Image (cartoon, helix red, strand yellow):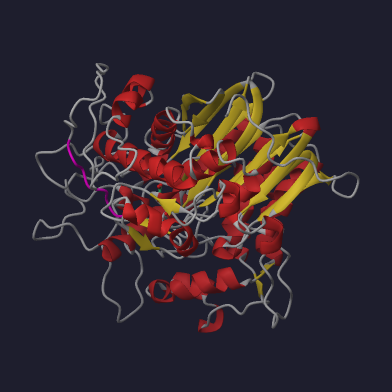
């Protein structure tokens, strides 16, 4: 065994500080520096982008709370990360309110138009539509939920009005931001899609070309749209001229001459007028004495992370050899994904056995399928979360394949001086969404409805995630908050389609069981067990652990990068640590209101959490 005795910490290999993304040398203007780790007091912000982090921090400095700063940072991301987030999309907002000690969530997921049917993503031959065709279409545009999420978050938890909170993003859209390599690269990856739609090409390929690194990118249309929302409230998005524009664009995306017609959308004014961001109970499980809260259906994030944690709690990971611990993680991830695929969808349409999926009894029964030495052949069957759990039954459930999912999205984490925390993941689904910009309005419409399964994998098996009128497609977004004996301890989340779930799971396990700091756990090499025939894993993970795990029957496919997490942890002594991804996707940006590293020694960044042992 090549790596016997390696600690999980050693697996990280690289310190976050050493990995800060560098700015390109040839810039006309240097993009703002990205610092992936900050420690201090007075509140903290971690996002993928330094401008968005600065906007959030500014709101905290002016006395806004975590909800105010989270909405401000999200709006800024709509400017600087318009291919991952924006008012044309949706997301999930998880909030810890220090005054009440409660964790609450807002479901801002896009909804299917009322005209959508179970067969809407089938082609004329009754076959599932080509995925790329579906992405680049009006058909995949769900009713956006982000504006209502911001409204609800401010109304329920905030202390500032939308006008004040949007101010920073309006300035950024009006005055511009400096293009970095990530923005240029994402534009390049989308170039063909963007050229399909003249309004998109005009905005994101200025002068017909990719934006230059170091150039200033302005979006006065979006500044105008944000001003409208600031002045009139988000009703202006769901009714009135802007709503007319959104509907007209989704129904009839104007393609460039000479490009093939794209499938038309079903969105109507009625869909927009009926949209509501929903308050939902968070998912909750105890893990090694900590309380882990996540997002309930229609996201599968909370339940799948929770089920895997419940399984892993049955093992003393911290005292296992690394390969044994990672083997157990890979098996638990696959089992939890089998159950996710079989049972989780929008619970207004399907009966999701949520309490059972979160139960210790079910987790114990599921771990019977984990052989400590040998990987189970994948895919594994789903379990039966029926409340009657015996010792180690034979697997009786169905095998349900996972549908195609994108790899975009963004997660931001904010904490304020009072200990309130916002953990917010938002998206327009694919990087670049549908590619369809609402002309003159400065934002791209989502393609979130491609998160539905286009057809049942097998008509004899459960299919909780088929399209239906008004239904919310199943998500994997996993904004998470962890409390320790009622006190806020940490919060995190990630982009990455269904790999979001395993990124959050692996990061939590790295922090809680692996004796890593949050920053180390975020940067550690990743694998993503999702019950596929092969586990996607990063090259460094395969290099270090691949031989030992392959010998146990695990199969890996190499993926350059998985996820790009951000998180915040409250450390002893009233300190707060903010961590962003140091390398993946060009790195992120963490900041605190008052940096303390000038004043004091570096504190212990990985204090033991609760009874995690
Ligand atoms: N649409 C995905 C979800 O809700 C997120 C997009 C992504 O991260 O690729 O799970």
Please name the residue shown 48% across and 31% down the image.
316
In this view, 268 is above or below 406: above
Q: Is residue 360 left or right of residue 86?
A: left
Decide if residue 228 is in sight here: no
In this view, 496 is above or below 30: above
Please name the residue shown 73% across and 73% down the image.
30
State the residue in front, 196 or 331. 331
In this view, 177 is above or below 59: below
- Residue 610 magenta-drawn? no
Overall secondary structure of the magenta stretch? loop
Which region is colored magenta? 398-404
- Where, quadrant-wise, is the N terminus in this rendering? bottom left
In this view, 369 is above or below 538: above
Please name the residue shown 22% across and 51% down the image.
454
Q: Quadrant of residue 609?
A: top right
Place of residue 100 in the rendered image (x, y in percent of width and height, measured from the top left) = 65, 18
Q: Quadrant of residue 355?
A: top left
């Amino acid at each position: 065994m090549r790596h016997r005795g390696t600690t999980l910490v050693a697996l990280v290999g690289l310190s976050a500080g050493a990995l800060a993304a560098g700015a390109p040398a040839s810039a006309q203007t240097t993009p703002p520096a990205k610092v992936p780790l900050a420690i201090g007091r007075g509140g903290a912000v971690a996002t993928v982008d330094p401008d968005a982090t600065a906007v959030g921090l500014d709101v905290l400095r002016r006395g806004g709370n975590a909800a105010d700063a989270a909405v401000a940072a999200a709006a800024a991301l709509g400017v600087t990360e318009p291919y991952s987030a924006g008012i044309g999309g949706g997301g999930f907002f998880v909030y810890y309110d220090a005054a009440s000690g409660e964790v609450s969530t807002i479901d801002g997921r896009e909804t299917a138009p009322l005209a959508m049917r179970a067969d809407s993503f089938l082609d004329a031959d009754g076959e599932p539509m080509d995925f790329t065709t579906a992405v680049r279409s009006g058909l995949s545009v769900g009713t956006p939920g982000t504006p209502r999420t911001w409204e609800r978050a401010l109304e329920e938890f905030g202390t500032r009005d939308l006008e004040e909170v949007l101010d920073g993003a309006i300035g950024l859209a009006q005055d511009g931001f400096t293009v970095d390599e990530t923005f240029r690269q994402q534009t390049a990856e989308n170039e063909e899609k963007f050229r399909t739609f003249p309004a998109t090409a005009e905005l994101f390929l200025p002068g017909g070309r990719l934006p230059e690194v170091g150039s200033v990118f302005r979006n006065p249309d979006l500044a105008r749209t944000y001003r409208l929302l600031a002045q009139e409230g988000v009703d202006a998005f769901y009714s009135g001229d802007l709503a007319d524009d959104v509907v007209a664009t989704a129904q009839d995306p104007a393609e460039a001459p000479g490009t093939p017609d794209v499938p038309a959308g079903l969105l109507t004014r009625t869909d927009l007028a009926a949209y509501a961001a929903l308050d939902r109970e968070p998912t909750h499980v105890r893990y090694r004495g900590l309380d882990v809260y996540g997002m309930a259906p229609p996201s599968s994030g909370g339940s799948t992370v929770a089920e895997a944690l419940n399984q892993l709690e049955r093992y003393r990971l911290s005292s296992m050899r690394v390969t044994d611990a990672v083997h157990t993680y890979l098996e638990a991830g696959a089992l939890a994904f089998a159950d996710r695929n079989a049972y989780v969808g929008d619970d207004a349409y399907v009966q999701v056995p949520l309490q059972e999926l979160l139960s210790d009894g079910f987790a114990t029964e599921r771990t019977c399928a984990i052989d400590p030495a040998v990987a189970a052949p994948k895919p594994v069957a789903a379990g039966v979360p029926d409340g009657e759990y015996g010792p180690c039954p034979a697997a009786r459930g169905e095998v349900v394949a996972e549908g195609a999912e994108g790899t975009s999205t963004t997660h931001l984490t904010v904490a304020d001086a009072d200990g309130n925390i916002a953990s917010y993941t938002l998206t327009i689904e694919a990087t670049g969404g549908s590619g369809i910009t609402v002309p003159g309005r400065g934002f791209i419409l989502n393609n979130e409805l491609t998160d539905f399964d286009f057809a049942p994998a097998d008509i004899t098996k459960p299919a909780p995630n088929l399209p239906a009128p008004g239904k919310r497609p199943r998500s994997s977004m996993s904004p998470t908050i962890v409390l320790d004996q009622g006190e806020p301890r940490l919060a995190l989340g990630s982009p990455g389609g269904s790999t979001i779930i395993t990124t959050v799971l692996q990061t939590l396990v790295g922090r809680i069981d692996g004796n890593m700091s949050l920053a180390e756990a975020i940067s550690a090499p990743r694998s993503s067990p999702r019950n596929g025939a092969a586990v996607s894993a990063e090259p460094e993970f395969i290099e270090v652990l691949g031989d030992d795990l392959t010998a146990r029957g695990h199969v890996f496919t190499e993926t350059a990068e998985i996820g790009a997490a951000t998180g915040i942890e409250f450390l002893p002594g009233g300190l707060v640590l903010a961590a962003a991804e140091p390398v993946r996707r060009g790195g992120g940006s963490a900041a605190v209101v008052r940096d303390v590293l000038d004043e004091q020694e570096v504190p212990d960044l990985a204090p033991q959490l609760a009874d995690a042992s």
